[in-house]
Amino acid sequence: MTSLYLLTDCHYVSKKNWVEGRPFTSRERGDQICLRYSPEILDTFINRIIEDKDTDTVVFQGDNVNSGDMTSHYEFRERLDRLKAAGKKVYMIPATHDYCSCNGEDECFQKGSVRYTETGTEPVEVMPRSGLYDFYKDYGPSQALSVDEESKSYSVRVSDKVRLIAICDNGNGRSHCGLFENGVKWLASQIKEAKEAGEYVLLMTHHPVISPWDVYAHMADFEMYGGYKELSNLMCEEGVRVIFTGHTHVQNIRKYTGVNGNYFYDVSTVSLVNAAGKMRRVTVDTEKGICDVSSIGIDKIDGVDTGDKSAYEYLYSLNFTGLLENSFPLIFKDYDAFLVSVDGFLPVDKLARHRGLVKFACKKIGKMKLSTLAKLGGGKKKLTKEQFDYSKTVIVIDTAFTVCRHIFAGNAPYSQDTAENIVIGAAASKLDRIVSKFKIEALQKVIPPGSSLSVMAQDFLCNTRTGDDDSITINLA
Ligand SMILES: [Fe+2]
Ligand SMILES: [Fe+2]
């Protein structure tokens, strides 16, 4: 039995790089993850890993730090050193948040990194892409069976019969986040070599190979692993059954079936510093050829006082949707407090100017029942009498907030037999007809070919994937 932990998108930010103030809060709200407690969150997970004496391998899947600065890299590497000192084998790959473009050397969306002061920012020393390999050599390449010269991808034997191939897909940052021709050849040769040695292959990389939702690849193909179609074909041809990914910050497990009927799973893990942050525990039973994946979150953050709130409730208010959910009641109770709460994230000046209108509109929205939406959207005739009675007790905005809570956390809550799913699905179908009749281009643009708003809505209402985003058993044989 071999087991390992997977952690991704730790987005570590050194406390030396910020002080409390609007600049840092704005950055954090924009990033949709918890940056301020990223050290404590990472340490909490590491403490749990060290307590587990049965698991000796830990893998980090990129975006290890948030903005490629050296101070965060030094502190992040100290955490890897701590795991190593505790007897763990540690492997990591970098991704695009781990370096900055230096003197035009790399094409990267991060041109530099900063320290956040009370009123602005000041530049700090950054990691160039070329510096990553030496800096993290002891956490992968030094233990490798083979390293791809060009991409610095590597393969390691995590146990007798299990080979982990770590694909460094940092490409050139934006226009291509995948392997180039020689890298693809190297990968194919590693898979072949492992098979000849009778080893099971686990692949891991940063960017997704299967899109979490169809709209994701449709709108942001560059966010996918560069060459994901070719890699999907290769995995199906070679019978590689699983790839572990990150980047989307979405907890999801999706299956791809190729033309030959062969299939694989993309097991994507939520960002560690998302409110619903989790790590995955992967166990390979080499006798049976079975790979078990489970997920582990935390209730408390070591060293952070969250009062009577769980870590999730405490952190969720830092997210865009959490902030909106928490701030919404303030519109009616204390409008000034509402403005303070959404400052830096909603246009506060406009909200202050149109106080009366905002209050009126939100009162209407805040009171709307699911039964009203059922009548307006044409879903009423699809509901049973019991479901319609139930829909009179449900506030639409509460349903919307519940949907939002599952966007990153996975396992969307409204299966296709629920009133919520039926009503929203019908309303989306009606909207589809309006979009097509009036040729509403802005919406037509976001709909993938062959899809519709009602199909897209299902991705966010229920688990259209493999049934459970937190766990799966995969037959590797
Ligand atoms: Fe990330
Ligand atoms: Fe990323």
Image: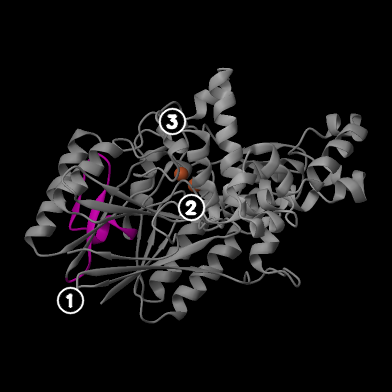
Mark 3 nearby-residue class (10 Å; few <14, some 14–19, many ≥20)? some
Tell me the distance, in whole angstroms, between the alpha carbons under discs 2 and 3. 27 Å
Q: Nearer the viewer, residue 307 or 369?
A: 369
Three-letter code, disc 1: Glu
Q: Which residue is mark 2?
A: 9
In the image, taking residue 439 as reference, residue 372 lies left or right, namely right
| Circle nearer the N terminus (2, 1) | 2
What's under tag 3, amino acid-wise? Pro
Q: Amino acid at mark 2?
A: Asp
Question: Which numbered circle lies on residue 287?
Answer: 1
Q: Secondary structure at mark 1?
A: loop
Residue 85 located left or right of residue 42: left
Q: CA distance from mark 3 to mark 1?
A: 43 Å
Q: Is residue 87 above or below residue 222?
A: below
Q: Position of residue 115 (x, y in %)?
A: 64, 43
Quarter containing the N terminus: bottom left
Residue indicated by mark 3: 448
In 3D space, how far apart are the residues under numbered discs 2 and 1 (Cα atoms)?
32 Å
Residue at point 76% right, 36% down? 346
Q: How many marks?
A: 3
Q: Is residue 264 left or right of residue 279?
A: left
Q: Is residue 242 visible?
A: yes
Q: Which mark is residue 96?
A: none
